[in-house]
């Protein structure tokens, strides 16, 4: 084995892969939430559809999107490898444990939270990504140019209460996943410092675990309330 | 006071073990947990039964031998303490107390509550040392070290290799132990000469022994009798990755 594969196959190396892919996915969340805030614009989805067109046609964005898909797959597969390895490290379990006395719940359940998120991602991509790329999305015309009206697909999806509920619960899982994942990702890379760790912990909790999931969850809730006529 | 015990009994490494119930009626709250086990062993001997095998040595919190997983926690409900520093006053009259050995693939059970922790020795042998010339001891103040650095090294060097970090970790990871051993040498000038490959060698041995990976749950640091900080794990990651990327070793 070369030193690169040897490093990446070590327990620390595997965690570095988790950290790099995880933190990259965190940066994606910022772009995704910022772009989708255009759903709140009361313009019947014009800004959102133009943005969707840009995101599916810009060559830089398209390149990064393949890096994104790869990151999701690598993050999930490596998590599976690590979980199996970690479980094998304790073949005989304790009869009685009290883990809540020494560690936060989210830090011990990253695998369960991640599995919920993976199922969510598959569902989410089936509803929007697949429809946008391969399905039949109605068309809209702005200034004489044809656009796929993904906004209508969004409206239809979020008019179902159970679909909205799945989104809200998944975003809660995202919050718990990131409250541990964001700051730990930096520690895996060796970054733990009196000056910077408090800042990273603040960002991890208030931005990545609370603000971003709350904004994401607000989208289906807003669309649903609009659908049932509670907000105009 | 009266306590109900459920103690892991296992004849040897290959035998099937099980939790066995014992009842002790006259336990003094001032007894240490190990003294309570001594009393139980005395009763077992009187009845002609086999005593419970458990590791212990100094009984003053510095040897790290007393590996017991008590009521779901390494060394019991106290933090920053070994089993010998745990007293029966930490429990209530009539409590049921579950006592198990450390559970990890790298720490096979020898008998009852005794586990083989030689995996730690092999990790240290892989690089957790400083090469020095033999001969008379050098003067203590020959190399000047700033106080904060000496303190940092000492915080890590407090590790007594008890294995509570492994026992408490959901992944049975030895990262806090290895980090402490790497850290206390890495911050000192005497240790820096061999620092570049030390982390690489020790992590390789740690993986070979079958310990799990670090999830940064922080359980190790909470259960560590010396309360060794997670800062050292971050330093180990830094040392390891830095060495992997920059060292000449391929």
Image: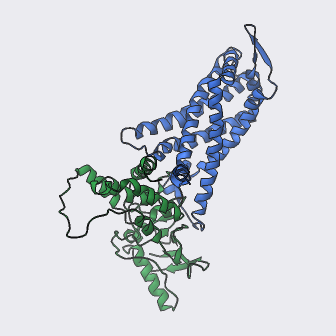
Chain colours: A blue, B green
- How many numbered badges does the structure rendering display? 0
- Farthest residue, direction right: A136
Q: Is residue A74 above or below residue B24?
A: above
Q: Residue at x 64, y 29 (%)?
A: A63
Q: Residue at x 66, y 27 (%)?
A: A62
Q: Is residue A184 left or right of residue B144?
A: right
Corner quadrant of residue B105: bottom right
The C terminus of chain A: image quadrant = top right
**x, y percent for residue B106:** 52, 67
Residue A125 in sight: yes
Q: Residue at x 41, y 55 (%)?
A: B197
Q: Is residue B13 left or right of residue A232?
A: left
The N terminus of chain A: image quadrant = bottom right
Q: Is residue B224 left or right of residue A108?
A: left
Depth check: give the residue in front, B44 or A20.
A20
Residue B27 in sight: no
- Farthest residue, direction top: A143
Q: Residue at x 74, y 24 (%)?
A: A155
**x, y percent for residue B5:** 52, 75
Depth check: give the residue in front, B88 or A90.
A90
Q: Is residue B47 left or right of residue B89?
A: right
Q: Is residue B159 above or below residue A52?
A: below
**x, y percent for residue A3:** 51, 51
Depth check: give the residue in front, B134 or B169.
B134
Depth check: give the residue in front, B189 or B97.
B189
**x, y percent for residue B67:** 45, 71
């Amino acid at each position: 084995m070369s030193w690169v594969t040897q490093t990446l196959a070590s327990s620390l190396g595997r965690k570095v892969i988790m950290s790099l892919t995880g933190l990259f996915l965190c940066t994606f969340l910022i772009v995704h939430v910022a772009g989708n805030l255009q759903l709140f614009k009361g313009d019947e989805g014009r800004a959102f559809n133009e943005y969707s067109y840009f995101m599916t046609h810009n060559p830089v964005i398209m390149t990064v999107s393949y890096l994104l898909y790869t990151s999701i797959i690598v993050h999930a597969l490596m998590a599976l490898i690590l979980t199996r390895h970690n479980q094998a490290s304790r073949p005989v379990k304790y009869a009685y444990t009290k883990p809540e006395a020494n560690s936060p719940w989210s830090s011990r359940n990253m695998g369960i939270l991640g599995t919920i998120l993976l199922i969510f991602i598959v569902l989410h991509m089936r509803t929007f990504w697949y429809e946008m790329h391969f399905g039949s999305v109605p068309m809209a015309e702005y200034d004489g140019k044809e656009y796929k009206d993904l906004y209508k697909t969004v409206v239809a999806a979020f008019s179902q209460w159970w679909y909205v509920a799945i989104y809200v619960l998944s975003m809660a899982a995202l919050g718990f996943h990131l409250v541990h994942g964001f700051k730990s990702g930096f520690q895996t890379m060796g970054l733990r410092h009196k000056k910077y760790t408090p800042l990273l912990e603040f960002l991890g909790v208030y931005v990545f675990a609370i603000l971003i999931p709350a904004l994401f969850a607000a989208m289906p809730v807003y669309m649903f309330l609009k659908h049932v006529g509670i907000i105009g | 006071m009266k306590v109900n015990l459920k103690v892991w009994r296992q004849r040897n490494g290959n035998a099937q073990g099980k939790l066995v119930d014992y009842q002790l009626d006259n336990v003094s709250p001032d007894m240490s947990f190990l003294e309570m086990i001594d009393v139980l062993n005395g009763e077992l001997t009187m009845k002609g039964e086999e005593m419970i095998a458990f590791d212990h040595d100094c009984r003053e919190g510095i040897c790290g031998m007393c590996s017991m997983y008590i009521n779901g926690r390494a060394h019991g409900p106290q933090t920053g303490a070994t089993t010998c520093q745990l007293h029966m006053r930490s429990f209530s009259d009539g409590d049921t107390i579950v006592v198990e050995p450390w559970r990890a693939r790298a720490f096979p059970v020898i008998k009852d509550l005794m586990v083989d922790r030689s995996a730690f020795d092999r990790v240290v042998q892989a690089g957790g040392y400083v090469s020095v010339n033999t001969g008379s001891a050098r003067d203590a103040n020959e190399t000047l070290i700033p106080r904060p650095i000496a303190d940092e090294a000492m915080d890590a060097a407090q590790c007594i290799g008890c294995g509570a970090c492994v026992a408490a970790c959901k992944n049975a990871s030895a990262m806090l132990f290895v980090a402490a051993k790497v850290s206390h040498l890495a911050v000192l000038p005497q240790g820096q000469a061999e620092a570049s490959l030390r982390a690489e060698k020790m992590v390789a041995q740690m993986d070979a022994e079958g310990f799990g990976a670090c999830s940064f749950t922080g359980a190790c640091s909470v259960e560590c009798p010396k309360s060794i900080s997670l800062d050292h794990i971050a330093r180990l990651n830094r040392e390891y990755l830095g060495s992997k990327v920059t060292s000449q070793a391929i």
